Structures are given as structure tokens and as C-alpha cells.
Amino acid sequence: MRKHIMGRLDGKRIVITGSSRSLGREFALACAREGASLVLNGTNEDALLNVLKEVTDLGAPSRAVLGSVAETGVCEELIATCVDAFDGIDVMVNNAGIVRDRTLLKMTDEDFDEVVAVDLRGPFLCTRAAGRVMREQGGGHIIQITSASGLVGNFGQTNYAAAKAGLMGMMYTAVKELERYNVRCNAMWPIARTDMTQPLIDKAGKTAAELGFGEPEDVAKGLVWLASDAAADFNGQCITFNAYKTALWHSPSEDHIKQCVEPMTLEELDAHYEAVVPLPVYSSRG
């Protein structure tokens, strides 16, 4: 028997969707090393069972639920499994995601719908199911895994960007609705070399590190920190982390404000915006 060493997530009961491969797998392993009890999820049975064995070998009590989070029953089973196995749920991590990249004018209905089903509907279903249990047990923490596409857009990812931006709106709404139940909701933009980002890295002809992507096992530390009690004061926050740099993103806010007592005329709008320089569109490339 491995000698127990106190971990940052001791006693935390955590569900992680999309945890059978890539960054989700590293999330699961990192949480297991820090003492969490885990419910894992994926659509590839062999990969899911492999990760289940890995986290179990690390000493983490674990269960696995096979299936797509696009299905209501799978999401409800994830939460029910955590409650049945560990008598509750402390952290819900909505990580599962797929891409179907095409430029906007070439994107098919199916491309759009498939991505939204997994990347937005799935987190909604899991957030709802987890939130209901967390309300009854007196608290909890829901973490949405977003991306640069959802925050600033990305060429060829209308569907993915819309879904990930939707997660941010969902998070801000959950903060308003669930805070009274002591349920917090935050987001994380992990900047890691993954199955999804590797094609971008290959196309750029540079190393992952040169492009600002961290290795998954290092980036997973950001999720551990956010899920731990060290982040207990965080609610409605979006943290980015690439293992070398971290930051918080502002929620949308106003600028260039003009207030009038009477309804504005078109001429007043002309005069106000004539002197306004349009706000820059953010780019991580500078």
C-alpha cells in the first residue's frame, strides 16, 4: 500500500468529461495524484479503461462512464455515479470537446450541430445535473474548459468558437443563479499541446513552446489549482495557463460611454462616435 501524502484535492469528488485522452487524461492523472476521487468519461472504451487503470494505480478511488456528453442520459449517469460511489460531488469539470473545422462559408449544418452538441449542449446537461445535486448538498464548484476560440475567435472554427463562447455566457449566468446555493462557477483556458492544437503547431512550422503551448501534464496543474481550496474565493473568473504564464480575463465591460437625459438623435450618435477610435480586436499574436 502506498504511503498516503496529503494532496491539494484530498476529499474532493470530481467528475471530468472527456478524460480518456489528451489533456483530459492529464487532468485526471493530475487530480488523482493530488488525492481526488474521480468519475471519468470518454467515448472510446479501451482508452477510458486504460485511464481508469492509471488513476486507480495512483491510489485514486475511480469510476468510469462510457458515452457522449451530447446525450442527456450519459450526463445524468456521470453525476449519479459520483453520488452513488462517493456520496456527493464537489467539482464538475466540463472538458469534453470535438472539432469539425471549416471556414464559415464551407461549414455544413452537420459540422455546426455536432460540435455544439458536444461542446455546449454537453456542458449544459452536466452543469444542470451537477448543479441540482450541489444545491441540495449545500455547495460545489463547476469548471468550464474554454479556449482562445471562445474568447477571441479563430479562423475556421465558427462552430467551436460559438460553443466555447457559449460556455462563458453559461458560466456568467450560473454565477448569478447558483451563488445563493454556495455553488461557484469558473472557467479555464488551458493553452496546451493537444490532439486539437497539434495541427496548428505543425502548420506553423514552430515548436509548441515557441507558439506558447505548454505540455499537457504541466498545463494540468492549472486545473488542479482551480479545483483546489486555494481558489475558493474565485467565482465567475476565467483563468488562462500554459505552464509558463497565467492570467485572468476580464468579463465584457463598457467603454466610450455617453449618457443622455433625452433619447439620443442620430446626429448626437454621429458626434459621439466621430471622436471614438474603435476598440481593438484582441489577438494573442500581438
Image (cartoon, rainbow, N blue to C red):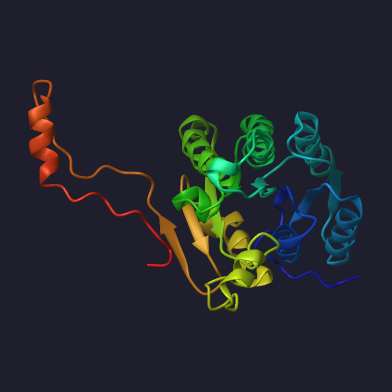
Q: Nearer the viewer, residue 253 or 10?
A: 253
Q: Is any part of residue 235 visible from this angle? A: yes
Q: Nearer the viewer, residue 222 or 24?
A: 24
Place of residue 33 in the rendered image (x, y in percent of width and height, measured from the top left): 75, 66
Place of residue 225 in the rendered image (x, y in percent of width and height, measured from the top left): 58, 62
Rendered position, 78 above or below 29: above
Count of number-bearing discs: 0
Quadrant occupied by the C terminus: bottom left
Q: Nearer the viewer, residue 72 or 234?
A: 72
In the visual, does 223 lie left or right of 170? right
Q: Nearer the viewer, residue 47 or 53?
A: 47
- The residue under the point 67% across, 45% down is 90
- The residue under the point 61% across, 59% down is 223
- The residue under the point 86% across, 49% down is 63
In the visual, does 284 lie left or right of 49? left
Q: Is any part of residue 234 visible from this angle? A: no
Place of residue 228 in the rendered image (x, y in percent of width and height, measured from the top left): 60, 57
Q: Residue furthest front?
A: 106
Place of residue 201 in the rendered image (x, y in percent of width and height, measured from the top left): 61, 70
Quadrant occupied by the N terminus: bottom right
